[in-house]
Image (cartoon, rainbow, N blue to C red):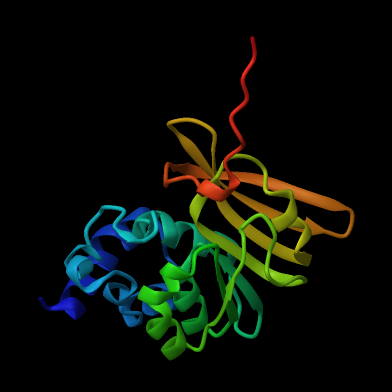
């Protein structure tokens, strides 16, 4: 399979046509080999409009949705970024010139994507998504959805920091952008999306008589 050709088709047919106009971001998506973020037997699906499994139930976000999230955070070279359950996004941000840490709750994900992240210059951390591995960052992104407003992630942002994530409590979800200011946090809804919710953030089931 010609992955370079598939990558160009992905950017042309899934990214540019969905109002992702940032040329630096388009170039980063063309440069990062998305197929390296899947097991070899699923690499063929890296550029399809599907959410392919990396490992341990974790899936790649569709390129259309991820590119729109990344454009919303307006990432700038030299900034620090935390990619929670977002290894491919971590490599794209690193290509854009950010200092990036990729965080996963299950080391099995890094067994698949560790080589690609190392080549991209991305640091890694194994820790529950409930608590960010680093603090005082400029950008946080996730390729998975969260079931509610992620307060601990917002608290990890420095003033001026941005968080882009999908909030999903049912069959449909909404991508949102949080920006931390001197006197509070703003929230803006971006678009509809429905990636899988991070299992470790799912609330415990309750029972009532």
Pinpoint residue 159: horizontal percent, then vertical percent: 81, 66
Q: Is residue 40 above or below residue 16?
A: below
Pinpoint residue 95: horizontal percent, then vertical percent: 47, 83
1 or 207: which is nearer to us?
207
78 or 121: which is nearer to us?
121
Classify residue 33 as left or right of residue 41: right
Pinpoint residue 129: horizontal percent, then vertical percent: 61, 58
Residue beneath the point at 30% across and 77% down: 36
Pinpoint residue 188: horizontal percent, then vertical percent: 64, 45
Q: Residue furthest top?
A: 209
Task: Examine the image and state in which quarter residue 101 appears.
Answer: bottom right
Q: Residue furthest right?
A: 183
Residue beneath the point at 71% across and 72% down: 134
Classify residue 154 as left or right of residue 3: right
Q: Is residue 24 above or below residue 190?
A: below
Task: Examine the image and state in which quarter residue 37 appears.
Answer: bottom left
Residue beneath the point at 67% across and 43% down: 149
**Do we see residue 108 in this rendering?**
yes
Residue beneath the point at 72% across and 65% down: 161
**Do we see residue 88 in this rendering?**
no
Q: In the rendered view of the protein, which quadrant contains the N terminus?
A: bottom left
25 or 4: which is nearer to us?
4
Q: In the rendered view of the protein, which quadrant contains the C terminus?
A: top right
């Amino acid at each position: 399979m010609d992955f370079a050709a598939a990558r160009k088709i992905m950017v042309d047919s899934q990214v540019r046509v969905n109002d992702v106009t940032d040329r630096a971001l388009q170039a980063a998506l063309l440069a990062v080999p998305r197929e390296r973020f899947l097991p070899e037997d699923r690499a063929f699906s890296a550029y399809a409009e599907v959410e392919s499994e990396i490992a341990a139930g974790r899936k790649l976000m569709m390129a259309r949705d991820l590119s729109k999230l990344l454009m919303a955070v307006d990432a700038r070279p030299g900034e620090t970024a935390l990619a929670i359950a977002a290894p491919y996004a971590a490599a794209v941000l690193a290509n854009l010139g950010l200092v990036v840490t990729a965080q996963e709750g299950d080391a099995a994900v890094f067994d698949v994507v560790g080589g690609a992240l190392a080549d991209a210059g991305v640091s890694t951390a194994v820790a529950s998504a409930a608590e960010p591995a680093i603090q005082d960052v400029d950008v946080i992104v996730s390729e998975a959805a969260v079931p509610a407003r992620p307060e601990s992630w917002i608290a990890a942002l420095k003033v001026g920091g941005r968080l882009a994530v999908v909030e999903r409590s049912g069959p449909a979800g909404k991508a949102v952008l949080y920006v931390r200011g001197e006197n509070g946090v703003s929230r803006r809804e971006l678009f509809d999306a429905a990636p899988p919710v991070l299992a470790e953030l799912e609330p415990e089931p309750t029972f009532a008589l």
